[in-house]
Image (spheres, rainbow, N blue to C red):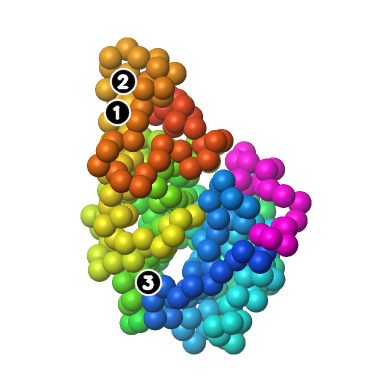
Amino acid sequence: MSWRIRQAQAPAAPTAAALSALKITKVKESLYVISGSSPGDAFSGGNTAVFITNVVTLVDTKLPGFGPAILDRIKTVTDKPVTRIINTHAHGDHTGNNGFFGASVEAIIHENADAALQKANNTAQRRTYRDKLGLGSGKDAIDLYHFGRGHTDGDTFVVFSGIRAMHAGDQFPWKALPYIDAGIGGSAVQHPKTLARAVDSIRNVDTVIPGHAPVATWNEFKEYADFTQDFVSYAERAMKMGRSVDEAAAQYTVPAKYKGYVATAAPNLSVRANMQLAYDEMIRK
C-alpha cells in the first residue's frame, strides 16, 4: 500500500509556517491555484486548483489538516460554495481534505484510484469514471481524461476546456524524474506513453497546473513527456549494454536540452528507484 495513501510520512498536523505559506494565485479567468510545495519544502501537498463558476470546483485538496486554510484562501476570491472536488489520483497529499468539505460535496475520481482508496479503508462515497467524463458546458466545461498507467494506474488529467487550461496532477509533478507508485499500478515504462497520448489527444490547452510545481505552459508539458521518454530510452539502452541498475543510475545525467531540469526533486526520490522500476518492467516484457 502506498505510503502517500497511508500518509505515513505526513506530519501529525500542519505547522503554522506551512499554513501561512499557502498562496492563492489567479491563473486565468475563473481559475486559481493554491500552491502546494515541492517535497523538499515544508510539505503541504499538491497544487489545488479552484475553478469558479456559479459554484466552486476544487481539484485536489492537499494533506490532512489544510482544509481550513484552503477554505480561507478561497474566501479571498469568492463567497460561492464548494460543491465539487475532483482528485487527480489517490495519494493522500492530493485527497487529504476531501472529508473536510463535507459529505454533500461531490467527489470525483478515476475508478482505479477509487479502488486504491477503498483498499486503504477510505470508503467515502465517490463518483467514478473509466476513460472520459464531461462536466458542464461552454466556459464552465470540465473534461476528465484517463490515458493509462503512469504515476499510478488511476491518474486523471483535468481539462478546463473553455479557458484552455489543465491540471495534470502528478503525471507532470515537477521538472525532474517522477515518483512512480508501482504499489498501486504505476509504471515507469508506460508513463511517457501515457503522457504522449495526452499530448496527442488533448486540444486547445495553453496553461498547465503541475502536481507540485509552478504553473507551466503546454509546451513545457510536452517537454516533460519527452524528458520521461528519454529516460526510459536511456534505461533500455543501458540494460541492453549489460549495465546493472546501479551502474545505469550512477551514469545517468539530465540531457543538456532540458534546461531547468534536475534528476530528482528530493533526496528520497532517487534516480536508482526509477531505474529499478524501468529495469523490472523491461525484464518482465
User: Does the CB distance between marks 3 and 2 fall below 8 Å?
Assistant: no
Q: CA distance from mark 1 to mark 3?
A: 34 Å
Element under disc 1 = helix
Residue in the foreground of this view, choosing between 140 and 227? 227
- Give the numbered dot on residue 238: 2
| Residue carrying label 3 | 160
Look at the picture and state if 39 lies above or below 251: below
Residue 9 inside the magenta-drawn segment: yes
Q: Nearer the viewer, mark 3 or mark 2?
A: 2
Q: Which label's residue is closer to the chain start, 3 or 2? A: 3
Look at the picture and state if 77 lies above or below 253: below
Q: Which residues are magenta?
A: 1-18
Residue shown at 39%/76% (left/top)? 28
Residue shown at 30%/25% (left/top)? 236
Task: Confirm whether residue 92 shows in the render.
Answer: no
Measured as percent of width and height from the top left, residue 163 is found at 33, 76
Q: Which label's residue is closer to the chain start, 1 or 3? A: 3
Residue in the foreground of this view, choosing between 282 and 19? 19
The answer to whether 84 appears left or right of 253 in the picture is right
Residue shown at 41%/22% (left/top)? 250
Alpha-carbon neighbours of circle 2 within 10 Å: few (<14), some, or many (≥20)?
many
| Residue carrying label 1 | 234
Q: Amino acid at mark 2?
A: Ala
Element under disc 2 = helix
Q: Amino acid at mark 1?
A: Tyr
